Amino acid sequence: MQCLRQVRCVTKLRAAAPTSRLLKVTNLLRSVSTLQQKKEMADNKPWVLISEVGDKGIHEDLVGIIKQHFQIICLEEFLQNPALHGPKIQGMFMWYYSPAAEPSLMSCLPSLKVIANGGVGIDHLDVPYINSFGVKVVNTPGVVSDATADMAMALLLASARQVVEGHLVSVNPKITQAPQSLMGVDVTGSTLGIIGMGHIGYKVAQRSKGFNMRILYHNRNRRSIEDEQAVGASYCEKLDDLLKESDFVVVVVNLTPDTTGLISHRELLLMKPTATLVNVSRGLVVDQDALVKALTSGTIRAAALDVTHPEPLPRNHPLLTLPNVLITPHIGTNTGGTVRKMMQMMVDNVLAAVKGLAVPNEVKAK
């Protein structure tokens, strides 16, 4: 109706208005028309649910990638009127486990076709249950491998060479000379044991080769001879053999019932007292009570963890007080380039699912 009034106004003005005024009015009309077209295009975009925008949700830059193809509603707004919003939602973007695919939420989303998980691990998702609603699950394999492997090496190096301790000494106004006790351990020429030789584990091996490390690995399935020779890796059929010989043990496995508590008291006792444990998989893969005991008793030298359980740890957790522990807040994939690739892959998968096309990265129920 508003647009119709503007058209009538323009028609009247054209009879008597000078050329300059006609141009202004014509341009105004074109602007109104463009805005209406954009609104119509936006209204036709499929709706998706996200947690929120910002540090506690999806970064604003990444939300922009989603907005190119979808109408977005945040969880808080959705919960204010799920009966109104629920039937519109066709896709859900799960970032740092949120929104959680709980029964109470799933039952409010009758039109949901796909849940896109930011990351590779889907241990927090009950895929058969989600599939029972006719909903697909997708993840982002491949794009996270380089960044996570980089993080594993960063933790290994920082722990070995006491980078954080050195920084604290350097910025302490009360210290004028570095203590001789600030002594690291050698990385070059040491033995690295990789538990889990998938995409990420293999990339850790590639990076370790540059440090002339002797590389051992344990995996459910042995890799090809060509793969082993390319990085100089030797297969350990028994995990115990790897643990006994390694100076650094890097854990890069998916969380499954078989890998939960994979590293516990027995495994830690097999490690060298000079060894360092690096975990970039999931917190539950390592028995944290056993790890605390091993670190305080001198069973192993140190631990460097990008993952814990829960995340973050309670502020009174003993791991937070130990001098031989380095902890980062699950930031293995947190680089600008990696998260943009992850989000673009999520968008591509959700678009395919909404359009009824083959979904490139669907996770099949086992």
Image (cartoon, helix red, strand yellow):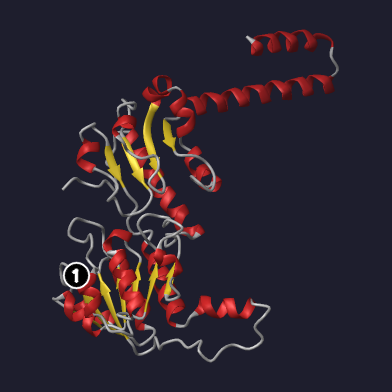
Camera-side residue: 245 or 66? 245
**Which of 7 and 356 lies nearest the eye of the viewer?**
356
Disc 1 element: loop
- Answer above or below: position of 304 versus 272: above
Residue 41: tell me if it is visible: yes
Query: Measured from the top left, where is residue 59 in percent x and y?
Result: 52, 47
Looking at the image, residue 346 lies above or below residue 113: below
Which image quarter: residue 356? top left
- Give the residue drawn at x 55%, y 80%: 166
Residue at the (16%, 72%) spot, across then down: 222
Can residue 74 be seen in this snapshot?
no
How crowded is the residue under tag 1: few (<14 C-alpha within 10 Å), some, or many (20+)? some
Position of residue 19 measured from the top left corner of the image (x, y, whole percent) = 83, 20
Residue 114 in the image, given as x and y percentages of width and height: 31, 37
Q: Residue at x 80, y 9 (%)?
A: 15
Amino acid at the residue labelled 1: Asn
Q: Position of residue 57 (x, y in %)?
A: 48, 45
Residue picked out by circle 1: 219
Left or right of residue 69: residue 258: left
The residue drawn where x is 24% and y is 31% is 133
Looking at the rendering, which quadrant does residue 138 occupy?
A: top left
Q: Is residue 37 left or right of residue 271?
A: right
